[in-house]
């Protein structure tokens, strides 16, 4: 049985038994960014959320390709990036070996970490290395202790339950040969680089097959701060919401869409969304 069919069966079971709500982490915070994240905005915010620049953090560059990683094989440039921002307790962790990812030595830095940051690249590489390993469980423990998991681009998509653009051969394929993310948020698909790459209609390829999922698309240098079942938009641009409705900010009205509709709406910085109930809960005041 292939992974695509297996996930379809699992999702069907979840729907039948009422487990299909979109839920965030019970504890801790997620910082999910749509790519090209400005360090001055997001590393500062990461520091604030983790409790300060002296908090121990783990940075994971595994989404990058081997050629890119070989250019900084000792991770000096990556370490310098975070140290330049002010962090003084940085550990870089990378492996493509799942046995190593489940080893005591590799997972030890997570035990005291207040934050974990996933770099961009290809999200399926993160799934290959860490999904359902002891590293995966250790990162969940960071959240359970009230810590932070952050990521940009691939590091954003991997945080959802459905792995959008997880195909190893063709990146534009929305539902490829890797379908499962790390599920820090359940029942959701997360896309990134939304408007810069004209991806705003791509999410419907997933929703046509998995209509129960909540879809969100993040523009570059734009993110969401997730706590429990709600998120707030931060950054320079917009987040697209694919929830089967169209919310008009100007009219303060929610329109229920017909099945198969390819409509969505945007939320901007400061606006908040309830993922469990799929509704905007805080709206910017019109000028």
Image: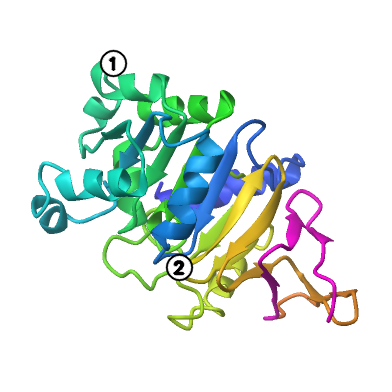
Pointers 1 and 2 in contact (CB under 8 A)?
Answer: no
Residue visible at 81% across and 52% down in the picture: 277
Circle 1 sits on which residue?
Answer: 104
Q: Report crowding for label 1: few under 14, some 14 to 19, many 20 or more residues within 10 A (C-alpha).
A: few
Measure how far apart labels 1 and 2 are at the Cα level: 35 Å
Badge 1 marks a residue whose secondary structure is helix
Answer whether residue 72 is magenta in the image. no
Q: Is residue 243 left or right of residue 48?
A: right
Q: Is residue 51 visible?
A: yes
Residue at 35 percent across and 35 percent down: it is 58
Residue occupied by mark 2 = 174
For image coordinates 52% across by 53% down, the residue present is: 32
Earlier sequence position, callout 1 versus callout 2: 1
Residue 161 in picture, x, y percent from top left: 54, 47
Span shown in magenta: 262-287
Assign a secondary structure to mark 2.
loop
Task: Please indicate whether residue 126 sits to the left or right of residue 224 in the image.
Answer: left
Q: Position of residue 41 (x, y in %)?
A: 48, 58
Displayed quadrant of residue 75: top left
286 in the magenta segment: yes
| Quadrant of res 259 | bottom right
Which x, y percent locates residue 104? 28, 16
Position of the C terminus, as image quadrant, is bottom right
Residue 266 against residue 52 in the figure, above or below: below
Tell me the number on the disc at residue 274: none
Left or right position of 172 against 184: left
**Residue drawn where x is 72% and y is 80% of the image:** 261
């Amino acid at each position: 049985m292939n992974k695509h069919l297996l996930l379809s069966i699992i999702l069907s079971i979840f729907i039948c038994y009422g487990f299909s709500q979109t839920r965030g982490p019970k504890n801790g915070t997620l910082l999910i960014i749509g790519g090209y994240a400005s360090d001055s905005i997001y590393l500062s915010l990461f520091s604030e959320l983790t409790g300060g620049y002296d908090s121990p953090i783990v940075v994971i560059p595994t989404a990058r390709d081997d050629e890119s990683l070989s250019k900084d094989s000792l991770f000096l440039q990556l370490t310098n990036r975070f140290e330049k921002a002010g962090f003084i307790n940085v550990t870089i962790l990378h492996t493509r070996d799942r046995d190593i990812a489940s080893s005591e030595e590799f997972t030890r830095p997570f035990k005291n970490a207040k934050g974990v940051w996933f770099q961009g690249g290809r999200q399926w590489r993160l799934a290959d290395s860490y999904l359902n390993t002891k590293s995966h469980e250790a990162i969940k423990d960071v959240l359970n202790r009230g810590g932070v998991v952050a990521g940009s681009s691939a590091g954003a998509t991997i945080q959802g339950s459905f792995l959008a653009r997880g195909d190893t051969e063709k990146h534009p394929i929305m539902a490829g040969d890797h379908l499962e993310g790390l599920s820090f948020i359940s029942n959701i698909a997360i896309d990134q680089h939304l408007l810069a790459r004209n991806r705003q209609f791509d999410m419907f390829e997933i929703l046509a097959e998995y209509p129960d999922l909540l879809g969100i698309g993040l523009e570059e240098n734009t993110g969401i701060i997730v706590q429990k079942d709600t998120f707030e938009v931060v950054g320079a641009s917009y987040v697209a919401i694919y929830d089967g409705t169209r919310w008009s900010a100007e009219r303060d009205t929610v329109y229920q869409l017909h099945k198969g509709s390819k409509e969505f709406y945007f939320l901007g910085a400061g606006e908040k969304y309830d993922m469990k109930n799929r509704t905007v809960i805080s709206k910017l005041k019109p000028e």
